[in-house]
């Protein structure tokens, strides 16, 4: 039986390869057909089909009984599974089709799902615990679907995060030769010039903190399904401290509130100005997240809360409460934000001195909106 494993593979990452190796180990498999999508109906690929095939060729080099199928590259139409599978069955005869557990739960939202389950068996990879998986499994089996649930549970690696981490020079989740190809082709580098400028303009330790903050914020956005624009999350996390070094030297304070000048919170106001004027960040949501990332304020929105928390919780931070606070944000952003605000307030109280008014507003706000 030929096992059809489709996806955007933008880019192919190590867990894709691990899943293919698992599929090859199944008794039912005589070959895995890797099917990169050319024009999927649910997403836009930022790289060329040929580039994604090149990366697959590199990542799968040395694996026997694997074939990359380019059937979707023959036209510019949107390609739906219910339309592609019959063509693959005609070509390969006996086939099965791989989907994720989340896709099985959402299969009713696909085009003609009842046709899909009639064409061939499904091979399903579960990802973590889900209340809806068993219900979906029973539903489709009752409809006559033949479904094999894999006993290998892949790590939850997101190609979206892989792309945004690549922007920051982090290629941990991809093969070294794939990362070399990405760098040589200049893929996933939309913000390359701005990132290089920031790295050259601020101390190395500050840039590393900014990079870690952006990555942590991106991960939480994905993990909690916050639905925030990943570009906004990247930029807000990356540039949140772009002015911190500047505030230690003589500089213009135009646009900075008088009561913030020469205080530890001055850099957040200056950061919004510098991000716009020096780095071309013109998105008001991003600038506002930068502007309040240290103090917080009343009625913070989702992006603002995320950057406030990511600044405190990025993986380079090490203080007594940090593990507890990370546990909180892994449960919900609102809980994580509340506990971060209160932890910061306790720290400032112990430190002594004046506490900035916006911080006091943020404390009052979270106390009034208690989150368990």
Image (cartoon, grey):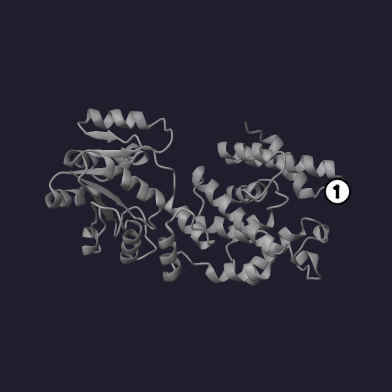
Q: State whether residue 119 is above or below residue 192.
A: above
Q: Secondary structure at mark 1?
A: loop
Label 1 Cα crowd, 10 Å radius (few <14 / some 14-19 / many 20+): few
Residue 27 rendering spot, x and y as whole percentages: 22, 38
Q: State whether residue 118 is above or below residue 41.
A: above
Rendered residue at 67%/70% (across/down): 201
Rendered residue at 57%/39% (across/down): 330
Q: State whether residue 164 is above or below residue 137.
A: below
Q: Nearer the viewer, residue 250 or 361?
A: 250
Residue 7 rendering spot, x and y as whole percentages: 32, 52
Residue 42 rendering spot, x and y as whole percentages: 34, 52
Horizontal side, residue 248 vs residue 274: left or right? right
Rendered residue at 29%/60% (across/down): 38
Rendered residue at 31%/54% (across/down): 41
Residue 328 rendering spot, x and y as whole percentages: 61, 37
Horizontal side, residue 348 vs residue 53: left or right? right
Q: Nearer the viewer, residue 198 or 371?
A: 198
From the image, which quarter does the N terminus lie in? top left
Horizontal side, residue 145 vs residue 9: left or right? left
Q: Nearer the viewer, residue 215 or 237?
A: 215
From the image, which quarter does the C terminus lie in? top right
Q: Nearer the viewer, residue 277 or 249?
A: 249
Q: Which residue is mark 1?
A: 354
Give residue 72's quadrant in the image. Answer: bottom left
Q: State whether residue 6 is above or below residue 75.
A: above
């Amino acid at each position: 039986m030929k096992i059809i494993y489709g996806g955007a593979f933008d880019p192919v990452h190590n867990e894709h390869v691990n899943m293919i190796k698992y599929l090859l180990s199944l008794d039912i498999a005589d070959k895995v057909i890797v099917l990169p999508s050319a024009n999927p109906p649910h997403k836009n690929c930022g790289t060329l089909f040929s580039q994604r095939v090149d990366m697959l060729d590199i990542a799968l080099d040395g694996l026997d009984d694997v074939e990359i199928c380019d059937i979707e590259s023959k036209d510019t139409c949107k390609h739906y599974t219910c339309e592609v599978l019959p063509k693959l069955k005609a070509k390969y005869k006996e086939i099965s089709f791989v989907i994720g557990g989340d896709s099985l739960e959402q299969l009713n939202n696909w085009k003609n799902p009842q046709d899909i389950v009639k064409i061939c068996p499904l091979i399903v990879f579960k990802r973590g615990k889900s209340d809806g998986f068993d219900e979906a499994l029973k539903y489709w089996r009752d409809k006559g679907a033949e479904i094999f649930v894999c006993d290998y549970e892949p790590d939850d690696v997101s190609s979206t995060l892989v792309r945004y981490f690549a922007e920051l020079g982090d290629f941990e989740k991809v093969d070294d030769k794939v990362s070399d190809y990405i760098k040589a082709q200049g893929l996933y580098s939309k913000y390359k010039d701005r990132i290089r400028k920031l790295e050259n303009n601020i101390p190395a330790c500050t840039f590393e903190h900014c990079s870690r903050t952006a990555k942590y914020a991106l991960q939480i956005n994905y993990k909690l399904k916050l639905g925030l624009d990943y570009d906004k999350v990247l930029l807000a996390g990356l540039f949140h401290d772009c002015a911190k070094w500047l505030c230690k030297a003589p500089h213009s304070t135009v646009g900075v509130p008088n009561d913030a000048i020469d205080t530890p919170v001055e850099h957040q106001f200056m950061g919004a100005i510098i991000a716009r004027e020096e780095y071309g960040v013109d998105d008001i949501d991003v600038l506002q997240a930068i502007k309040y990332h240290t103090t917080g304020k009343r009625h913070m929105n989702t992006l603002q809360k995320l950057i406030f928390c990511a600044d405190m919780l990025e993986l380079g931070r090490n203080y007594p409460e940090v593990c507890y606070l990370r546990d909180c944000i892994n449960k919900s952003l609102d809980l994580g934000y509340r506990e971060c605000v209160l932890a910061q307030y306790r720290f400032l109280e112990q430190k002594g001195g004046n506490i900035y008014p916006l911080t006091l507003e943020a404390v009052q706000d979270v106390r009034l909106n208690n989150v368990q």
